[in-house]
Image: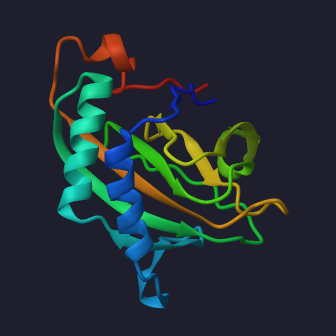
Amino acid sequence: MTDFDIKIKDKFLSKDDFNVIYNTAQSLSFNTNDLAYKESDNHVWFTAEAPEDTRNIVIRSVSEYFNVQIEKLKICQYTFVFRSKDTQVHNDTDKGNDFQTIIYIKGKDNVHSGTGFYVEKDGKYILNTHIGFMPNRLVSWTPDVYHAPLSFTDEFNPRISLITQYKLKEKDDRSNKMGNRSSSSKE
């Protein structure tokens, strides 16, 4: 079992910063060339790289909120998730990712349009926790946690979000605010 370290913050961005990110999302044209495939698990969504002004807002806001220094913003992409037939459970573990976030941008407030967090048991992924969609809600977690958009539910509504992954500079007080991000126990 993976130990969860999930944080949620509503109204994460200031109104002005959220408007910049929202307006950028409004201007994006997602098309079939923007499909992202994650190796063998059929994880498909539309993506668009975030422009520099969005990246700067995210770096500043996340650094201030979590009291961390970001060495590298590894991924900063707008994603458009649509309804799917299957659960697309995955984790984003890699050696260069200390933690990640999703900022919900555009969609219908709905518990079934958010993100599910799973535990692995007997070779199957079991939904353990789910967090609903709400514009300007930040959800953060460690990269080894299995998760998926709840796009397989009948109540799911398409959404646009901003996904990010971070490599952090080492800081003495980092573990006080975020928990130990460098390790997670599995049973």
Q: Tally the numbered discs.
A: 0
Q: Is residue 34 above or below residue 13?
A: below
Image x and y of residue 99, in percent: 37, 37
Q: How is the image coloured?
A: rainbow
Q: Position of residue 103 (x, y in %)?
A: 46, 47
Closest to the observer: 167 or 30? 30
Residue at position x 53%, y 29% in the image: 6
Q: Nearer the viewer, residue 99 or 134?
A: 134
Which is nearer the eye, 108 or 92? 108
26 displayed left or right of 149: left
The answer to whether one can see residue 183 in this image is: yes
Residue that lies at the very extreme toward the front in this rendered image: 16
Q: In which quadrant will I find the C terminus?
A: top right
Q: Residue at x 73, y 49 (%)?
A: 110
The residue shown at (72%, 60%) is: 87
Quick check: 177 above or below 36? above
Residue 40 pos. (x, y %): 54, 71
Looking at the image, which residue is at 41% across and 46% down? 93
Of residues 124 and 30, the one drawn nearer to the viewer in this rendering: 30
